[in-house]
Amino acid sequence: LEGHSGSVQSVALSYDGSHIVSGSVDRSVRIWDVNTGMNLQTLEGHTGAVMSVAFSTDGSRIVSGSENGTISIWDANSGRTLKTLKGHTEAVQSVAFSNDGLYIASGSRDQTVRIWDAGTGVSLQTLQGHRNWVRSAAFSYDGSHLVSGSDDGHICIWDAKTGENLLTLEGYRDWFMSVAFSNDGSHIISGSDKTICIWDAGSGEKLQTLEGHSSYVRSVAFSNDGYHIVSGSFDQTICVWDANPGVNLHTSPGHKDSVNSVAYSNDGLYIVSGSCDHTVCIWDAKTGVCLQTLEGHTGDVLSVAFSIDGSRIVSGSRDKTVHIWDAKTGVTLCILEGHSDEVNSVAFSKDGSHIVSGSVDRTICIWNANTGVKLRTLEGHTAYVLSVSFSSDSSHIVSGSYDDTVRIWDAITGVNLHTLEGHQDWVQSVAFSNDGSCIVSGSDDQTVHIWDAKTGVNLQTLTGHKDRVLSVAFSSDDSYIVSGSVDNTICIWDAKTGVNSQT
């Protein structure tokens, strides 16, 4: 959708999915038809950049927040300004209607949250307590509570009627660098400041803290049966853990630089790791013994994965190549050359016949996993490709990029089926749901988006993180999404409703 003359700061979908509203630095708000892409209305009146936009639940009104501290309420059909709300003394970062449409919440750089009467425009409450910019504000479903997130590292829960601060949730000390669900979706593991934590995915309770690494944990993964965990760290070691009761079974030195990526084979017998020492190592998951050290890359190994049958390993490197290895002998089967810059992400298709790779050169390559022949080069992204993944039936590929977009591709023809726009910053992580119907994406804009994989429509925009979202994944039954952020939190979301069930 083209029309804005400045960067787009905020987008929102109407409740029925028929319209999109966008706000821009060009000071305008635009309404778009989802099916045709036609610009139906251009709403002008703000004298500063538009930072945030939202529809009322019935789709009849739009609210927008501006850099100059004002909020406008618009008639979505006529484009007429209904009210201009004044009270904030700095830029309005977030606006939202209550579900019944009677109230509006706003969060501002003036460190306050305000509640407004959506009919009269009167400021009913000014909620004070944050000590830095308020990035996000939202009503509970029944409108009785309000939640706000701030650059002060805190989440506040407020009584929407009285304005009382009911609860302040404080963040963790350090970044979460890796998160993953157990195969049955019951547990989550996270890697952070030298520790691995195991969490109950239902209650959000931290069950175990696994200590043993002497530096940051870069990558974590569950075995398929959920009984074991592997972690890779900047301390150059691999650790294998008993998930219950959290015992360190063995610590395996061997790499000579930080470990960037770890993965289990499907049968849980082997582990593969990729390191900044330019090598790939295969480990016996039971004993921790290094069975093979695969040498051949001339740059940091950024991504590794097993084929489903465990017979092969694929690795992507800063040396611009993708390598396919025999997992038993360690022999290099193929060196895939075609990217002109470092390879950030690699994955096998489920049947093992194809490999997809995403690169800093802005392209995605599809390769024949048996011959190493490059079948397709997918072009369209205008910046680095950070994450790639196959759908479970291998018919589609999803990619996330520095160009702020998510793209869906036909894996056979290479055709770009949809370009999903809505993120306002780099897309760090993408994944298909296991049934292939949805896509989840996490971005530096602090949001998680859920998309319809067939139509490309944004089904949900999940807000709550206060900093970059680095990792996203579906649970095995597709009922939950987990996201990990630089704000030191892991959020668990209901994949159907978008409700943040735990932080």
Image (cartoon, rainbow, N blue to C red):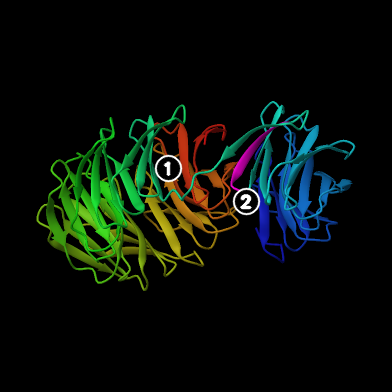
Q: Relative to residue 148, is residue 185 drawn left or right?
A: left
**Relative image position of residue 62 (x, y in whole percent):** 78, 44
Q: Which mark is residue 151?
A: 2
Q: In the figure, residue 68 lies in which quadrant? A: bottom right
Q: Relative to residue 90, is residue 482 drawn left or right?
A: left
Where does the magenta region start and end?
A: 151-159
Q: Looking at the image, can residue 207 be seen? A: yes
Q: Looking at the image, can residue 352 be seen? A: no
Q: Main secondary structure of the magenta part?
A: strand
Asked if the stretch drawn in magenta spans residue 154, the answer is yes
Residue in the foreground of this view, choosing between 96 and 486: 486
Q: Which mark is residue 473?
A: 1
What residue is drawn where x is 43% and y is 34%? 478
Residue in the foreground of this view, choosing between 158 and 440: 158
Q: In the figure, residue 331 lies in which quadrant? A: bottom left
Q: CA distance from mark 1 to mark 2?
A: 25 Å
Q: Relative to residue 365, is residue 238 drawn left or right?
A: left
Rate crowding at label 1 as few (under 14), some (14 to 19) or many (20 or more) other CA atoms within 10 Å: many
Which amino acid, mark 1?
A: Ala
- SS at mark 2 in the image: loop
Q: Relative to residue 331, is residue 37 drawn left or right?
A: right
Q: Earlier in the sequence, mark 1 or mark 2?
A: 2
- SS at mark 1 in the image: strand
**Relative image position of residue 359 (x, y in whole percent):** 39, 65
Q: In the figure, residue 449 lies in which quadrant? A: top right
Which amino acid, mark 2?
A: Asp
